[in-house]
Amino acid sequence: MVGLTKRLLLSILQLRTSLRNIAQNGNFFYATPLYSLWERGSEIARYTKRALPYSKDYSFAAYNFSQLLLRDGQVDLARRYAVEAYKLSYRSEAEADRDLVAAIRLQWPSIDTDE
């Protein structure tokens, strides 16, 4: 199992290097969507491990994570994090939290009914 994991990681790193080389040589037609997909997945992994658990203001972190997931096409999971951010900010009187609630409602109009 460990050998398989190492081979898979090596293959992924080789693919990433190949995509960078293709992008640097000007063949963006093929490289850009694949490289963008790779980078988005890496960004989601980094955010999940480094930013989300240690955030001082979890409601904003959850909202930002929902936006990242939405850009990646993970709509259901993005909505789940948006609902979580909404629940944390809904009753707050702080201006920043009210702005966050307004932004969430703008993107997800039926958020009040999601529980």
Image: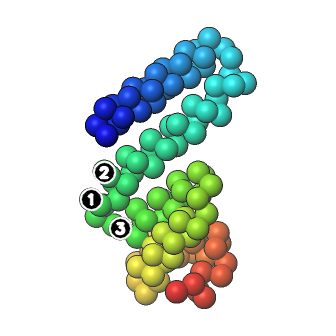
Count neighbours of disc 3 (C-alpha within 10 A) and say few if under 14, some if 14 to 19, many if 20 or more: some
Task: Kindly identify which residue carries mark 2.
Answer: 50
Residue 100 at least partly seen: no
Taking the spot 57% from the left edge, 84% from the top edge, the residue there is 114
Which residue is drawn at the image coordinates 35% and 36% (left, top)?
Answer: 5
* Spot occupied by residue 38 in the image (x, y as percentages of width and height): 52, 37
99 shown above or below 61: below
Element class at badge 2: helix
Camera-nearest residue between 99 and 106 = 106
In space, the residues marked 3 and 2 are separated at their CA atoms by 13 Å
Confirm whether residue 106 shows in the render: yes
Tell which tag, 3 or 2, sits nearer the viewer.
2
- Which element type, helix, strand or loop, lies under badge 3? helix
Q: Is residue 67 left or right of residue 57?
A: right
Give the Cα separation between the discs numbered 1 and 3: 8 Å
Which residue position is annotated with label 1?
54
Secondary element at image label 1: loop
Label 1 sits on what residue type?
A: Tyr
Q: Is residue 78 above or below residue 35?
A: below
Q: 42 above or below 64? A: above
Give the residue number, with chain letter if any, for mark 3: 58
Residue type for callout 3: Tyr
Cβ atoms at labels 3 and 2 below 8 Å apart: no
Check the image and name the residue furthest to the front. Answer: 1
- Tell whether 92 sits left or right of 30: left
Q: CA distance from mark 2 to mark 1?
A: 7 Å
Looking at the image, which residue sits at the far right?
Answer: 29
Residue type at the position of mark 2? Arg
Asked whether the beta carbons under mark 1 and mark 3 sit within 8 Å of each other, the answer is no
| Residues at discs 2 and 1 in contact (Cβ within 8 Å) | yes
Instruction: Pinpoint residue 16: horizontal percent, then vertical percent.
Output: 49, 26
State the residue at coordinates (37%, 46%): 46
